[in-house]
Amino acid sequence: MSELFTIDCHTHILPKSWPDLQKKYGYPGFISLKHTSPCCAEMMLDNKPFRTIQANCWDLEARIADNSEHGVDLQVLSTVPVMFNYWAKSEHTHDLAKFLNDHIAESVTKYPKNFIGLGTLPMQDTHLAIEELTRCKAINLHGIQIGSHVNNLNLDAEELFPIFQAAEELEMAVFVHPWDMLGKERMGKYWLPWLVGMPTETTLAICSLIFGGVLEKLPKLKIAFAHAGGSFLGTLGRIRHGFHSRPDLCAIDCQIDPNKFLEQIYFDSLTHDREQLEYMVKILPINKIILGSDYPFPLGEQIPGKLIKESEFSEKTKQALLSHNAAKWLGLDLKKYL
Amino acid sequence: MSELFTIDCHTHILPKSWPDLQKKYGYPGFISLKHTSPCCAEMMLDNKPFRTIQANCWDLEARIADNSEHGVDLQVLSTVPVMFNYWAKSEHTHDLAKFLNDHIAESVTKYPKNFIGLGTLPMQDTHLAIEELTRCKAINLHGIQIGSHVNNLNLDAEELFPIFQAAEELEMAVFVHPWDMLGKERMGKYWLPWLVGMPTETTLAICSLIFGGVLEKLPKLKIAFAHAGGSFLGTLGRIRHGFHSRPDLCAIDCQIDPNKFLEQIYFDSLTHDREQLEYMVKILPINKIILGSDYPFPLGEQIPGKLIKESEFSEKTKQALLSHNAAKWLGLDLKKYL
């Protein structure tokens, strides 16, 4: 394994506990945490088990120990997408976002050499979202994590544009994570919402931001997509061919070839596959791929950065993927961390 | 351009006219054809324009002229997926399938050196589907084209298994084409059902057949997928990682690594992208890629086989992709066509 400075841009964290949200807000649909042993807890959705998690999901020292073992120097913290709660009343989502963001900011303050933070926003309310985005900046978070859609809105919805605009102005990084997968009624078995639904969500998010003209209008927006961009890069030929063969349908709000936006978008490296990562390195500008592992979840890269570090890429390429590109995306001065 | 023998496995055809199906069956929802000039017609869905088509969609001589210009020797004919009509009463879908299949069989009989035919089946009725599959064999079709799902059933549904079993026994090729795309409510603009929905449909179909154990149980089934397998190959790392990390969710009906089935599945070559085609050639057994163009539609490869013929693949690889693999899939003796 290489000793190159390593930033894991895609990790999830939860507080060890939080108030009973159903009680606090007055209606069900929120996640609660039931600690079952010192090492384990059950995320519960309306009293039904949603996901079992380990201490490294909330315990900062456990995360630092894992990082040390894995060769990760700096971890970018963001909440678990099921905590987005865009469906709830916006004042409640806002209240919860503040709680989660304060927790992440405190984690960064406690271990500033180990963690960087991304906030969550009440995206269903443009005004509150921008208010909280501004506050995220003030409490030293480096960006935000948002879902691949907001209720029935794709990311090109005009209600969302001012939030992206504010993120560009504030130089806050944006990390788009799939959630609330479309087509669930067709994906009842085999973990298909995670294996097929999530990559589709991400692709739909990227296409919406490109075809909707959002990326064209905000060329300095620092935006990254989880899971290597889902199925976007593997179907880019079809997407581009559609754009060129039916501009009457595709090029109505943005006339620029989708390929051009590969110079603007960041993708995390989570392919789980050597050939697919090599394909990314082949077709993308080398400064656009950032290490992301989905730590600490089972669909993640178990040793974050292993695929990159064991690749045959040049040292320069490895360093770009492991931290230099992330520093650019997040606006970090790496010297402060060395 | 190379002079290698070329079979285009993915083309669509319609009869020049057919009975008024709403009148014949007694309810709406069927496609009709309105000829607007000698060269053009409008496919109408309940009196609303669905798609404009050209004469090469129905005129055999126009197709042969195109093939001659494009360097295609043999074209595999199949209906347009909107004609599947799995939603209709099964006796009506059966009746229409017989009409469409007879038309394709007649086209092949008229020009046996130019065309090969795939039938369509009333997949929503296991018994009628097998009856028509058997008849397709008898009228000299080489296989069938089916949709990526059948109403609310994915392709691993037990109702569909006997049809696949019969296809294996009869040595009929199966071509899976995306249709009736999931998540349409999230894809209102930018042709997204075609650009994002279709690749997802195909991926869901492949995953269903793998995880559901259908391919394991039918190792001799000769099955091919349109559009280079949709987003399957570009997200295979994630799919495999899911299989290995959560066997409790993924490996419940089939315990074999999804990768193993790459030796069984055929993929058409429709990537619209040189690097993606090279990626396919890199990761797939070389005998599993078949030329498919989606002729005569705009999302197709405008000169079928151009990407392969202009590639830097060896002559042997080109010949495999352009016809040898197709001959194996369809059970053709190429000597008869040379």
Image: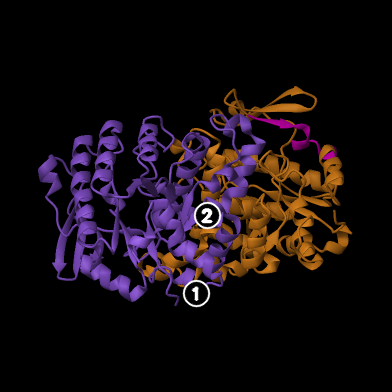
Chain colours: A purple, B orange
- Residue plotted at (12% across, 49% down): A20
- Residue plotted at (40% across, 53% down): A193
Q: Which residue is mark 1?
A: A310
Task: Give percent across and percent down for residue B332.
Answer: 78, 62
Residue B236 counted in the magenta span? no
Question: Circle 2 marks a residue in which chain?
Answer: B
Classify B205 as above or below A148. below
- Residue plotted at (62% across, 40% down): A242
Residue type indicated by callout 2:
Thr
Question: Which residue is at the far left?
Answer: A23
Residue B57 counted in the magenta span? yes
Residue type indicated by callout 1:
Glu
Q: Residues within 10 Å of mark 2 (few under 14, many from 20)?
A: many
- Residue B94 appears in which quarter of the rendering? top right
Q: Which residue is mark 2?
A: B203
- Residue A189 appears in which quarter of the rendering? bottom left
Determine whether, in the image, residue B238 is placed left or right of residue B40.
left
Task: Give percent across and percent down for residue B168.
Answer: 63, 64
Range covered by the magenta-colored residues: B51-61
- Residue A44 appears in which quarter of the rendering? bottom left
Q: Secondary structure at mark 2?
A: helix
